[in-house]
Image (cartoon, helix red, strand yellow):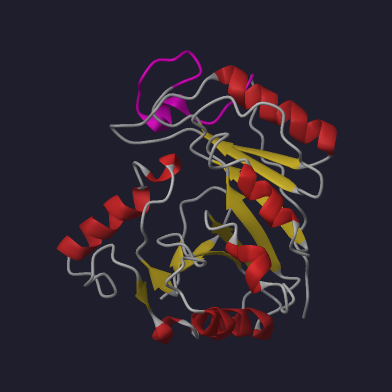
Amino acid sequence: MATQSSIEWTEQTWNPTTGCTKISLGCKNCYAEIMARRLHAMGTPGYENEFELTLHPLRLEQPIKRKKPTVYFVNSMSDLFHEHVSDEFLDRVFDVIRKTPYHTYQILTKRADRLPQYFHERSCPKNVWLGVSVEDKRYGVPRIDYLRQVEAHIRFLSVEPLLEDVGEIDLSGIHWVIVGGESGRKARPMQLEWVESIQQQAEEAGAAFFFKQWGRWGADGVSRDKKTNGRVLNGRTWDSMPELLTQV
């Protein structure tokens, strides 16, 4: 079933696929891979293949059964646009999305080059927020241009884990920017100046800005529990989000 999420910027997660493969530096300490191994060890249904890419057709109907308008993060445990997820299966996922216009679906991918290919002859539903991960200059920043090629109602960036100063980025056509540091024992540090630069650029571009967390390393460069480091940036929390599109 779809599950309540602890992710600050969503309400529930819906995983019609699970499992993935690493393609960039942001994948190095993948939280989903660690969680999948734990769930496999616990015998949780759906994780028999641990973190190997697995399609779950029986989960497709889950959002249809929920009548309360809900914000879903699609595939918190996978990448919906993974190269081994067929267009046919993607069509089935988006068919469910179109059938449930009262829900909002946040879809995030690192396979950004597939976005304009898939949506070339397909429209992106208005209740989809489409996003790409941006962890660094080499792998992350180029994904933004692919995202911009899709006519999505909301386009967003998940700049997490932020691994370096990404410099000046083109935020035209981007509606929402999320920034966060890495968690876990092997987390890589994030510096205050990197975050401030993105926040200022988002403000100048008119994009909503959401600071998710410091993660393992605080603004002062000290390693602590992520709850202790919290999510305060320069004395305040940043929780801006695009407005939900209500369709009944």
Can you say whether 229 is above or below 161 in the image? above
Span highlighted in magenta in the image: 218-234
Judge whether residue 157 can be spotted in this image.
no
Residues 223 and 29: in front is 29
**Residue 102 rendering spot, x and y as whole percentages:** 70, 76
Q: Quadrant of the N terminus?
A: bottom left
**Residue 202 rendering spot, x and y as whole percentages:** 75, 35
Which residue is at a point 78% across and 66% down the rendered structure image? 245
Residue 4 is left or right of residue 72, and the answer is: left
Can you say whether 158 is above or below 78 in the image? above
Q: How many marks?
A: 0
- The secondary structure that most of the magenta stretch takes on is loop
Residues 16 and 172: in front is 172
Occupied quadrant, residue 141 = top right
Residue 201 is left or right of residue 217, and the answer is: right
Judge whether residue 240 can be spotted in this image.
yes
Can you say whether 29 is above or below 186 in the image? below
**Residue 246 rendering spot, x and y as whole percentages:** 78, 70
The answer to if 60 sits in the magenta stretch is no
Can you say whether 86 is above or below 40 in the image? below
Residue 179 is left or right of residue 47, and the answer is: right
Which residue is at a point 58% across and 27% down the rendered structure image? 232
Residue 45 is left or right of residue 174, and the answer is: left
Which residue is at a point 55% across and 60% down the rendered structure image? 11
**Residue 171 rendering spot, x and y as whole percentages:** 76, 41
Q: Quadrant of the C terminus?
A: bottom right
Which residue is at a point 66% across and 23% down the rendered structure image? 196
